Amino acid sequence: MFYQVLKYVLLGPLLRLVFRPRIEGLEHVPEEGAAIIAGNHLSFADHFVMPAIVPRRVTFLAKAEYFTGPGLKGRLTAAFFRGVGQIPVDRSGGRASRAAISSGLAVLRKGRLLGIYPEGTRSHDGRLYKGRTGVASMAIRAGVPVVPCAMIGTFEAQPTGRRLPRIMRITIRFGAPLDFSRYAGMADDRIALRAVTDEIMYAILTLSGQEYVDVYTGEAKAAAQERARAKGRRGQNGGDGLPTA
């Protein structure tokens, strides 16, 4: 009930007013049956804008940090994310990754739409980064199509660190469903998983027109932070790495 009220009465109309989304290819989203919607991830707003315009309910796998914040604010945030149909996942890898895949498969077995960001986290600079293979594992194991989705303009509307979004128009573009039935029985094959993931990322890239970077987002963020720290140290030392007088 909360999901319906939020989507059609509260959050949905507000998002449409703020972003005036231009929707392209919505006919590619299946009207019934299980499917994965795999999209790029540019902004915190992505969690809400795309589900708000898809007629069916979309269940997203969201990072566990949204559900574990301290105090009243943390409890309210967790309640909100659960209310909008998001499932907490631990992104630390290993057993946590397997648990996330199990959670996604449970959604698909119920014949529902599962939303996922193959990059794993938001892009810090608006570019598209290498996808993680969890989406491929779920698509192959569940035998469901993957609908590529591109969010265009949400990075400019609400980049990382900006609390409130700018009022501007965005585009949400869906591509034709991708069929990976030819990989049936290969969900544990690393080469197959990478091939499927790369095909999904290429479809997203084609829709979004972003610049592609063949490294994981987390690695790129860490490298950018290290460059910023090194630049700061050079500035403190007079620009040449030597202490100033």
Image (cartoon, rainbow, N blue to C red):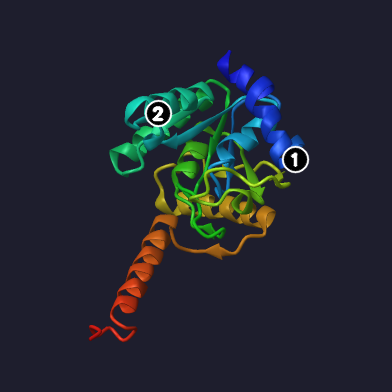
Q: CA distance from mark 1 to mark 2?
A: 29 Å
Quadrant showing the C terminus: bottom left
Q: Earlier in the sequence, mark 1 or mark 2?
A: 1
* Mark 1 neighbour class, 10 Å CA radius: few under 14, some 14 to 19, many 20 or more: some
- In this view, the mark in front (1 or 2): 2
Give the image location of residue 36, x and y in percent: 57, 36
Residue at left 49%, top 42%?
A: 135
Q: Nearer the viewer, residue 142 or 4?
A: 4
Q: In this view of the protein, can residue 43 be seen by the observer?
A: yes
Return the residue at label 1.
20
Return the residue at label 2.
73
Residue at left 40%, top 28%?
A: 73
- Horizontally, residue 208 falls left or right of residue 68, namely right
Residue at left 62%, top 32%?
A: 51
Q: Is residue 159 above or below residue 112?
A: below
Q: Is residue 241 above or below residue 128?
A: below
Residue 77 figure quarter: top left
Q: Nearer the viewer, residue 100 or 1?
A: 1
Secondary structure at badge 1 equals: loop
The amino acid type, in three-letter code, at marker 2 is Lys
Give the image location of residue 138, x and y in percent: 48, 37
Q: Is residue 196 above or below residue 57?
A: below
Give the image location of residue 227, x and y in percent: 37, 70
